[in-house]
Amino acid sequence: MGKARPHAHGWLAGLLLLLLAACSDGYPTDDQAPLSPFDMSPTERVGALNALGASAHPDTHWRYGLDGGCLLRVARRGDWWRWQESVHDLRGAAVQLQIGSDAADRRRYDVVIRPAGSAEGSVMLSSRREFEALQARQLARLLARDCTQSAP
């Protein structure tokens, strides 16, 4: 019986080494930290807006594109087949969050773009979740900032 114990300890030590080697840093190698909106390119920001627009509201879908670096295309689909598209010049535009309620009296968060020098704005995203609306607002503000910084 005395010989079985040292052999068992060696087997357990070997198993422990295998487990530790499989997880060398303690983190899976395929996990990556999410990219900060401040570190994204304009194309990546528009992609992030499209991801938000696809899931932000159960009844409405949003799509985005960027033309010439400063024109944000916003397409909204509330019906199955019909898209309504608008184009917004981001040079000097203000992007704000408005809180309201929908027809069923549920809280709604609207991200609104107001062109430079205008009191009127257009909704570019509507969500029932504040976090999504705040993300969209930040992405749009960064697009507007970069457009303003690159203007001659």
Image: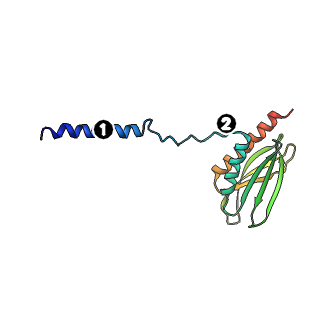
Q: Where does the image place residue 23, in percent across and percent down from the top left?
A: 42, 39
The answer to whether 46 appears left or right of 27 in the picture is: right
Q: Point out which mark residue 14 bears.
A: 1
Residue visible at 50% across and 40% down in the picture: 29
Task: Give the tally of numbered discs.
Answer: 2
Residue visible at 27% across and 40% down in the picture: 12
Q: Where does the image place residue 1, in percent across and percent down from the top left?
A: 12, 41
Mark 2 or mark 1: whose residue is earlier in sequence:
1
Q: Amino acid at mark 2?
A: Asp
Q: Nearer the viewer, mark 2 or mark 1?
A: 1
Q: Point out which mark residue 39 bears.
A: 2
Against 145, is 99 above or below?
below
Q: Amino acid at mark 1?
A: Gly
111 vs 149, nearest the viewer:
149
Helix or strand or loop: what does disc 1 sit on?
A: helix
Against 11, is 127 above or below?
below
Q: Quadrant of residue 90?
A: top right
24 vs 105, nearest the viewer:
24
Q: Quadrant of residue 25?
A: top left
Residue visible at 38% across and 37% down in the picture: 20
Q: Where does the image place residue 62, in percent across and percent down from the top left?
A: 73, 56
Residue visible at 82% across and 51% down in the picture: 121
**Is residue 100 something one can see in this rendering?**
yes
Q: CA distance from mark 2 to mark 1?
A: 44 Å
Helix or strand or loop: what does disc 2 sit on?
A: helix
**Is residue 127 something one can see in this rendering?**
no
